[in-house]
Amino acid sequence: MSRSPRSYSTSDLSRKSGDIIAEALRHPVIITQRNKPRLVLLTIEDYQRLLTRSARRTAGTIETMSDELFSEFGNAVETYADDRETPHRPS
C-alpha cells in the first residue's frame, strides 16, 4: 500500500537534516516553505526512474500519427459515436 510522503519545513530540515535525509533514503520526503510544498527529497534511483519514464513519453498530432494508429483512432471514434446514437433501453 502506498502512503503519502511525510512533510517537513525548511526549518525542520535545518535542525534535523540527518534524520530527514535518512527518511528520504527510504521514501520521498516533501520540504515545505511558508506552509507550501516546495521541494521533494528522494533517492537518486527514484529520480533516475522518473527521468527514464518521462523520456519514454511522447506526444504527437494527427499529422504525425502512423496510418495504422490513425485508422484505429478513427474506428474507436466511430464506435463511440454509434454507441451514443443508439438508444439504450433500461433493463
Image (tube, grey):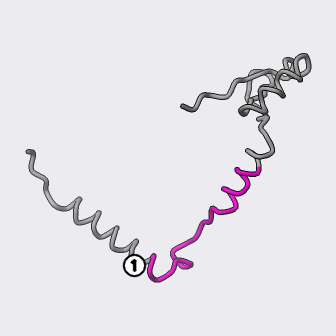
Q: Report which quarter residue 51 is drawn in.
A: bottom right
Residue located 66% across and 56% down the image: 53
Q: Report which quarter residue 91 is drawn in.
A: top left
- Quadrant where the N terminus sits is top right
Count how many numbered circles sit on residues in the image. Answer: 1
Q: Secondary structure at mark 1?
A: helix
Q: Position of residue 70 (x, y in %)?
A: 44, 77
Q: Position of residue 46 (x, y in %)?
A: 73, 44
Q: Residue furthest right?
A: 14
Residue located 77% across and 37% down the image: 42
Residue located 71% across and 32% down the image: 27
Q: Is residue 82 left or right of residue 26?
A: left
43 or 68: which is nearer to us? 43
Residue located 9% across and 45% down the image: 90
Depicted 68 relative to depicted 21: above or below: below
Which range of residues does the magenta coloring cover? 48-69
63 or 58: which is nearer to us? 58
Residue 64 lies in the magenta-colored region: yes
Q: Position of residue 73 (x, y in %)?
A: 40, 71
67 or 61: which is nearer to us? 67
Q: Which residue is mark 1?
A: 71
